Amino acid sequence: MGRRILIFDTTLRDGEQSPGFSMNTKEKLEMAKQLVRLKVDIIEAGFPIASEDDFEAVKTVSQTLKGPIIAGLCRTRFQDIDRAWEALKYAERPRIHTFIATSDIHIQRKLKMSREEVLEAAVAAVQRAKRYCEDVEFSAEDAHRTDQDYLCKVMEEVIKAGATTINIPDTVGYAIPWEFGARIKDLMNRVPNIDKVVVSVHCHNDLGLAVANSLAAVEAGAGQVECTINGIGERAGNASLEEIVMALRTRRDYLNCETGLKTEELYKTSRLLTSITGIAVQPNKAIVGANAFAHEAGIHQDGMLKEKLTYEIMTPESVGVPQSRLVLGKHSGRHAFKKRLSDLGFELSEEDLNKAFVRFKAIADKKKEVFDDDLIAIVEDEVFTVPEVWSLDHLQFTSGTNIIPTATVRLKRQDEILQGSGWGDGPVDAAYKAIDLITEMPGRLLEYNLRAVTAGKDALGEVIVSVEFDGQRVVGRGTSTDVIEASVRAYLNAVNKAVLRRKGRTPAEEQPPAQKGV
Ligand code: KIV
Ligand code: ZN
């Protein structure tokens, strides 16, 4: 057995904190449920004092999920710690994660405190957190730019105060792998009782070294790695969870470490994050990018045909990348559909299965071959989405080289049918104008992304849009064999999310959100 490394996922906190990646409570819960299926050890669900939304998300995740430890972030201020506990107290296995910066530049310029005051605040915070909860993590923000003697002292004292995990962040992504590894090794050798706690690392990717630095720390003795799905996070992001986990698995021969993750869930988790945030990973992204397992060069393909190990260090199956196999067609029945979804890891309720099956039949009628990727897109479209306030009843458009593009859209809201027409720069623009007219909720299109889910001229098109309604950014997703219809479905998905957001708006949400981060 290799040494067991704990995986601390901070997608919902450090990841969500970066511009464009914000998620509402429902989306965070959906994501957290998938992180449970992935079997991460710790889910950092948010920063409860940062905003009402963050508080609600941490509370909801704590109340709902069983299995992993649920962590909430707080500064060393007692008010922060108390608020974090308010949200975390429902969790089966709560963790208070408190932090303060320890580098001189942060202490002097940002905190305007002395080293002694920071040390006192750190110890007092851990003691305060311990009144609530046995599991307390302490992070020394900007640890990598902290004087090592002082860092050792801070860690010694917080361990004495009861911290059970001590975290060494490279907050600004400044470290070089062997330098960071040496720092961890030195801490392991010098800090009294460090063997009684878990040593964690948290690396940012400003120099593209977050994963390498994390692995160097693991080699030096770290027992927990903090990371995010798709590597999202502040600025250039955090260390990518899927890369760390697969590096540990693939190079177990060298690192002799293992995680408890179900790696076959990695691809699905990455896809879910993309469909929630609307931000795709680059095609050449390791592990989860569209080209991660594509062998293009003739010489590589020839090698692969003779012996897969010539060019493949891990299999696509091991990370759950669906094989573009023909699985179902228009004659396939409900039973085969259910079985295939179950093979792909989706256990749906009868109601969700029915919804997905109706959509599958409609798509299979237009598209001769339905692949695994298509099935995943259908489930994401029909099941992992908000309830439809407005649904598409009819769409008609005209477009061409020398005519003005126009669109007529008919939408359904409960028993009501409403119709509108618009013209625009193209059929998508025209259809969006028609929808705005019907819903009386004009949206501003910020981003539009189209991709083919599978290969072939009859491929399912997936559109992800980012739309602003009343100053709030909402992401919508839609699929169809017709790209205009997919575009309309994506826009309507965003409209429905915006409507639900308005309905569920609490008085606190009406106020400007509190500043996130530190
Ligand atoms: O990057 C950082 O230092 C952090 C800490 C709050 C853990 O995110
Ligand atoms: Zn961070």
Image (tube, grey):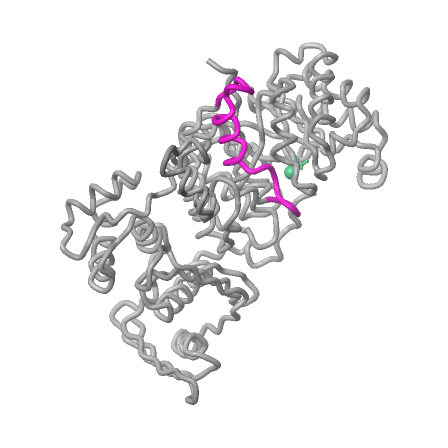
Figure label count: 0
* Residue sitting at x 48%, y 57%: 505
Q: Is residue 223 left or right of residue 480?
A: right
Q: Is residue 130 visible?
A: no
Q: Is residue 124 left or right of residue 369?
A: right
Please state the quadrant of the image where ligand 2 appears: top right
Q: Is residue 412 left or right of residue 160?
A: left
109 or 128, which is in the foreground?
109
Q: Which residues are magenta?
A: 233-258
* Residue sitting at x 65%, y 19%: 220
Residue 17, percent across and down? Answer: 60, 46
Q: Quadrant of the C terminus?
A: top right
Q: Is residue 83 magenta?
A: no
Q: Is residue 182 left or right of residue 307?
A: right
Residue 268, percent across and down? Answer: 40, 42
* Residue sitting at x 56%, y 32%: 85
Q: Is residue 245 magenta?
A: yes
Residue 442, percent across and down? Answer: 48, 74
Q: Quadrant of residue 155?
A: top right
343 or 329, which is in the foreground?
329
424 is higher (above) or lower (below) than 331: below
Residue 199, percent across and down? Answer: 63, 20
Q: Quadrant of residue 200?
A: top right
327 is higher (above) or lower (below) than 191: below
Q: Quadrant of residue 113?
A: top right
* Residue sitting at x 60%, y 57%: 511
307 or 402, which is in the foreground?
307
Q: Is residue 72 visible?
A: yes
270 or 385, which is in the foreground?
270
340 is higher (above) or lower (below) than 103: below
